[in-house]
Amino acid sequence: MSREPRVRVWDLPVRLFHWAIVLLVPAMWATHEIERMDLHILLGQILLGLVLFRMIWGLIGSSTARFAGFVRGPRTVARYLRGRGGPALGHNPLGGWSVVAMLLLLLTQIGLGLFAIDEDALHEGPLSYLVSYETARILAHRHETIFYLLVALIAVHIAAILYYRLVRHDKLVGPMITGTRKAAAGDDAAMTPAPLWRFLVAAGLAVGGTLAIVRWL
Amino acid sequence: MKHILLGAAALAAIATAAYAQRPAAPVIQQRQANYKQMAAAVKGINDQLRSGSPDLAAIRPRAALLANYGVQVLRWFPRGSGPQAGTRTRARPEIWSDWAGFERAGARLLVAARAVNRAAQGGDIAAVRAAMPALTRACSGCHDDYRAPEH
């Protein structure tokens, strides 16, 4: 049995972050639906830490994790849409922007939740005390609106995965689990991993930043 | 002249009928506004309790409002101000079919709100803090039984 050559695409932190989001976003919805707002607020703070970590990892992480590596200009995106431009290792020029949109939506959603309050003033985000009841209620309604935008973007994300799988015969889920995919002709240099100390720095900053926001601010 | 008078009377009758169709609307809107004020008061008190140096001057008027509204709350629900009234309300029909139970829920609110107010007017922050959980339990207990879900 011959083993096909495989190439590393995603480092472990990127994959763990991705699957943590896959678990936590539905969990956020469910805890709201069953009115376990204590859990909802706790999980929201964990999500804040994860998203902060991913933003920092986008600056100092492995080559495919970095914003500088996958956030491309409009011309590159247009070229990709026309089917030109070589295969990308990591996010393609269009997918890169969907990552940015997803992170911004998550961050907005978590930010709104920090200040939100329920109509009975029984459950409130950790920063709700900084705003009036009326403002906190408006932010809670925005929190609901952003949720629907998030669901819409997730639907686009899943549709794109299906499109690549069915039309372009490119399996994207496996690599997000194993971290590797089949090597393709025209692959540019393989992923450059980041050393462990960078991960520790990013994780430390994310945890510290989250605690600073929810405890001391 | 007679025609004008008749016309005016007809208009008045129509206007009255239209108004009579939803006599409960102002009642419902007023009680919803009152409940929002109560929630804002609860938040205002919690905000102070949460801060390092709770400000009694900010707590007292809010505690007084809660106690005051605790006295009134049953009067906000005259017969006919339920879901059949034509104005959007989450007040469940059980309020009126189980009025005795609703009265007990109202009494729990009044007792709890008075305890918070007594502590606040007495200047005892620790007692305010200790009295708040009973108040929020009274709120959510009644909402569980007598208020329809949001959607």
Image: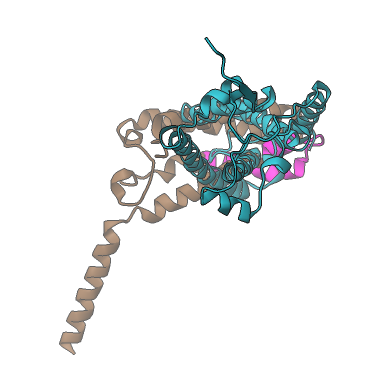
Chain colours: A cyan, B brown
Which residue is more in the foreground, A98 or B48?
A98
Is residue A147 left or right of B127 when viewed as pictured? left
Which residue is more in the foreground, A205 or A80?
A80
Which residue is more in the foreground, B126 or A20?
A20
Residue B46 part of the magenta segment:
yes
Quadrant position of residue A102: top right
Give the image location of residue A151, x and y in percent. 48, 39
Is residue A196 left or right of A70 when viewed as pictured? right
Magenta span main SS: helix
Whether residue B79 is visible:
no
Q: Which residues are magenta?
A: B45-70
Whether residue B17 is visible:
yes
- Residue A176, placed above or below residue B14: above
Tell which residue pokes out farthest to the top in this image: A1
Q: Report the quarter where the C terminus of chain A lies.
A: top right
Which residue is more in the foreground, A108 or A76?
A76
User: How many marks on residues?
Assistant: 0
Quadrant position of residue A105: top right
For image coordinates 60% across by 28% down, the residue present is A18
Give the image location of residue A76, x and y in percent. 62, 51
For image coordinates 61% across by 26% down, the residue present is A43
Residue B124 part of the magenta segment:
no
Give the image location of residue B101, x and y in percent. 39, 28
Is residue A63 left or right of B95 when viewed as pictured? right
Give the image location of residue B99, x and y in percent. 35, 32
